[in-house]
Image (cartoon, rainbow, N blue to C red):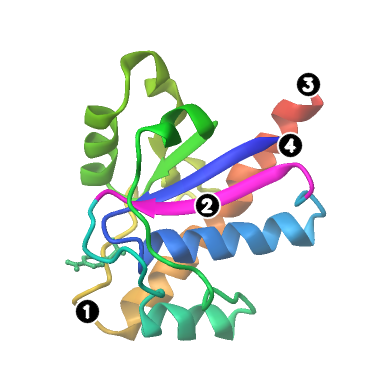
């Protein structure tokens, strides 16, 4: 099994969107029997909460169902458990590094480093205080990077 964890601040907007988008493409490419997927937040604000309604609606329009996901906080066991820990922005990335034992730092990366369309955007912008447009942009970015990430994981498996 390869294990993948998406991380943002609250685990109700960006990382559940990324989890849903990645899960869909993993299922579409019949890789769901060997890739394990989860998401979490660096903060505790929304433990047990469903994804933001706006995130749910934008995902649903693209055939991605995230309604059943529930917020949780990153725990230290995650650094051992997950092969890929993908931060949505620089703040998440630095918070993860600060929590993680140094010998496991190699598992942590910026999710948009896997992007395929080379938009020049390195962070998934926090959409929480904005409008629906921000959630559409989140989905655009996480769908693109999900495809790049899965390509990479499949290439490594086959080599
Ligand atoms: P997320 O968005 O990190 O993408 O889940 C946020 C959710 C909640 C808050 C901030 C960002 N908040 O301040 O409660």
Residue named by callout 1: 130
Q: Are marks 4 and 3 in contact (CB under 8 Å)?
A: no
CA neighbours of label 1 inside 10 A, class few (<14), some (14 to 19), many (20+):
few
Seen at 54% across and 74% down, the residue is 68
Residue named by callout 4: 154
Residue at the top extreme of this rendering = 103
Residue named by callout 3: 159
Q: Secondary structure at mark 1?
A: loop
CA neighbours of label 4 inside 10 A, class few (<14), some (14 to 19), many (20+):
few
Q: How far, Cα to Cα, is label 1 from label 3?
A: 43 Å
Instruction: Judge whether residue 38 is colored magenta.
Output: yes
Residue segment shown in magenta: 33-42
Q: How far, Cα to Cα, is label 3 from label 2?
A: 25 Å
Where residue 106 sits, quadrant-wise, is top left
Badge 4 or badge 1: first in the primary sequence: 1
Q: Are marks 1 and 2 in contact (CB under 8 Å)?
A: no
| Percent x, y of residue 154 | 73, 37
Badge 3 or badge 2: first in the primary sequence: 2
Q: For ligand 1, give the image quadrant.
A: bottom left
Residue named by callout 2: 38
- The answer, for residue 119, to whether it is visible in the render is no
Label 3 residue near ligand 1, CB within 8 Å: no
> Compared to 109, does 130 lie above or below?
below
| Percent x, y of residue 110 | 38, 40
Q: How far, Cα to Cα, is label 1 from label 2?
A: 25 Å
- Please state which of the two labelled residues, at mark 1 or mark 2, is closer to the viewer: 2
> Compared to 112, does 142 lie above or below?
below
């Amino acid at each position: 099994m390869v294990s993948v964890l998406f991380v943002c601040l609250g685990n109700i907007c960006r990382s559940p969107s990324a989890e849903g988008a990645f899960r869909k493409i993993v299922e579409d490419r019949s890789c769901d029997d060997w890739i394990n997927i989860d998401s979490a937040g660096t903060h505790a604000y929304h433990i047990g909460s469903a994804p933001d309604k706006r995130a749910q609606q934008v995902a649903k329009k693209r055939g991605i169902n995230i309604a059943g996901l529930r917020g949780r906080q990153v725990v230290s066991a995650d650094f051992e458990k997950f092969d890929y820990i993908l931060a949505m922005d620089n703040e998440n990335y630095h918070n993860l590094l600060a929590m993680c034992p140094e010998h496991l730092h190699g598992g942590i990366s910026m999710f948009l480093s896997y992007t395929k369309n080379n938009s020049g955007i390195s962070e998934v912008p926090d959409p929480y205080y904005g409008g629906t447009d921000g959630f559409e942009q989140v989905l655009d970015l996480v769908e693109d990077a999900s495809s790049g990430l899965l390509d990479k994981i499949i290439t490594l498996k086959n080599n």
